[in-house]
Image (cartoon, grey):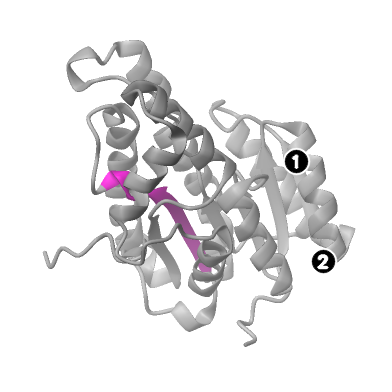
Amino acid sequence: MDLGLRDRVAIVGGGTRGVGRAIATALVREGANVAICGRNEQDLRHTELDLARIASQTHVLAIPVDLSGARSARRVVRETVNRFGQIGILVSHVWYESWEHPSEMTDDSMLAAFEHNYLSSVRLSREVVPYMRQLRWGRIIHCMPIDVRQPTEEAVVSTSTQVAFMAYLKGLSSELARFNITVNNVISGPVETDWLKSSLEAEAGRQGLSADEVLDQRVNRIPMRRLGRAEEIGDLVTFLASDRAGYMTGSDLYIDGGMQRSIN
């Protein structure tokens, strides 16, 4: 299926590993020009080479950057526009973990999570909007884990800041709808990635269990009885970035194997 993304320009934050990398790959396969950014330069260069093999080096831009910095978003957008001339798609995919119980949250941990999970994505959104308005077309998509709807007490710091960003995006979707700019959230269940593996190992240590036992606990809570695949998230995000999803905005889309079954 041709989604009409050829020559569109996308920025994928956190696009070097796992879900972010799968999203960048799916966009490149559809013919989009993609700027990826991340903190680990080695991962960044490996991903850049892999993406260039799918399309060509001219369709990929790798930007080493820590998006939690106040000036980082402006730099990413400026370099993308200098290279490709426009921006039509923004995919943000960040998750800062801080394992603290609600009663133990410190100001420093909250500020760090707020900087990474909230402000970094707000800044990126703010920087791309003028270019999307100029095009009278745009797609802003934020990816987050299902913890935002089913929070655990240990992840309350990370979850709180992601929920705050969800509220921001709801307002942004209303503001930008008349410019043909859509804003949506993709909320995923457990996805088979290196990040999940390290998360399971950390949780196993806290519970005094093996990583396999913790994995079984997670999978047993999923009606499909399996983990998600990063490529499945990439396919959904790519669809949302296309004109075929042009009437969908301000929405939360779940891709979680049936975990979210609330009717409210």
Q: Nearer the viewer, residue 259 or 211?
A: 211
In the image, taking residue 262 as reference, residue 234 lies left or right, namely right
Magenta: main secondary structure equals: strand
Residue 142 falls left or right of residue 89? left
Residue 159 found in image quarter? top left
How far across and down, in percent of the image, does residue 66 sit?
62, 29
Write down the region rendered in magenta: 138-148
Image point 53% across, 60% down: which residue? 229
Disc number placed over residue 92 in the picture, else none: none
Q: Between residues 63 and 226, which one lies in front from this camera angle? A: 226
Crowdedness near tag 2: few (<14), some (14–19) or many (≥20) residues, C-alpha within 10 Å: some
Q: Nearer the viewer, residue 103 or 119?
A: 103
**In screen coordinates, is 260 left or right of 169?**
left
Distance of label 1 from label 2 (alpha carbons): 16 Å
Q: Is residue 132 above or below residue 95?
A: below
Residue 183 drawn in magenta: no
Q: Residue at x 45, y 73 (%)?
A: 180
Q: Residue at x 87, y 62 (%)?
A: 53
Can you identify the residue that label 2 sits on?
54
Q: Secondary structure beneath disc 1? A: helix
Callout 2: SS: helix
State how many labels appear: 2
